[in-house]
Image (cartoon, rainbow, N blue to C red):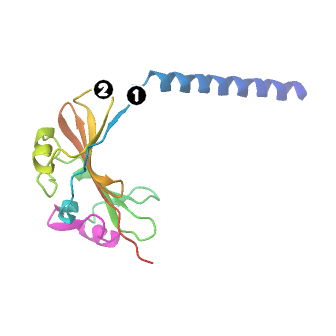
Amino acid sequence: MFQQNRREMVIITVIITIAFALGLFVASSRDSLNIHYPDKFAVLDDADFDLAWRDHELHIGSTPGETVMEYYPFGYMLGFSTIFTLNEDHILLTFTEDENILHRAHIENPALPTYRGIRVNDPFDLVVEQYGEQYAWVDNGNPDDFDAVYGSDNSRCIIFQVRQGLVRRIVLQNDPLIVN
């Protein structure tokens, strides 16, 4: 019995050591991220968090989850999460846990523009024309691949994921003000 337990402990130790070594290798082989901040962030309007899709208006930061599900009955919740998918439309909507308020939209659909008219597959130069040059960005040294963040905090911002100079995903986030 003692010999069986000892062999199992050796096997577990070897597995943990291999997993740790693999983790260190992966972490060390990744390019480091560069974070750049503007002197001043662009100001976003409330309208920047409005989306019009399929004859309905959504307000990121205030539309109740029940309303979204009523507007889009073909969508569905992902498991027991707070994420609602309009899978065919390539849109993910996230709700706050307790209040069930729409607070984030991930857009990968080129047919759905932001309030200022930016769409997936637009060149990033067009984003700068509409939103300005006052954004933070994160890159790994490749000037054509980065994430641009408009807005001064993580509770109210717009993120443009840019790959090869083109917008590939747009994330609108506007956390609701909850008054107790």
Amino acid type of the residue that numbered disc 1 sits on in the rendered structure: Ser
Name the foreground residue: 83 vs 152. 152
Left or right position of 12 against 65: right
Left or right position of 82 against 172: right
Residue at the (27%, 61%) spot, across then down: 74
User: Which residue occupies the extreme bottom position in the image?
Assistant: 180
> Where does residue 120 sit, x and y in percent of width and height?
17, 44
User: Which residue occupies the extreme front position in the image?
Assistant: 39
What residue would you read off at disc 1?
A: 32
Total numbered badges shown on the rendered structure: 2
Q: CA distance from mark 1 to mark 2?
A: 8 Å
User: Which residue occupies the extreme right position in the image?
Assistant: 2
Amino acid type of the residue that numbered disc 2 sits on in the rendered structure: Gly
The reply to whether dot 1 and dot 2 touch (C-beta < 8 Å) is yes
Q: Quadrant of residue 65?
A: bottom left
In terms of secondary structure, where does tag 1 sit?
loop
Name the foreground residue: 172 vs 133. 133
Q: Quadrant of residue 56?
A: bottom left
What residue would you read off at disc 2?
A: 141
> Where does residue 84 sit, x and y in percent of width and height?
35, 59
* Range covered by the magenta-colored residues: 52-71
* Mark number displayed over residue 113: none
As for residue 160 lying within the magenta part, the answer is no
Residue at the (18%, 67%) spot, across then down: 57
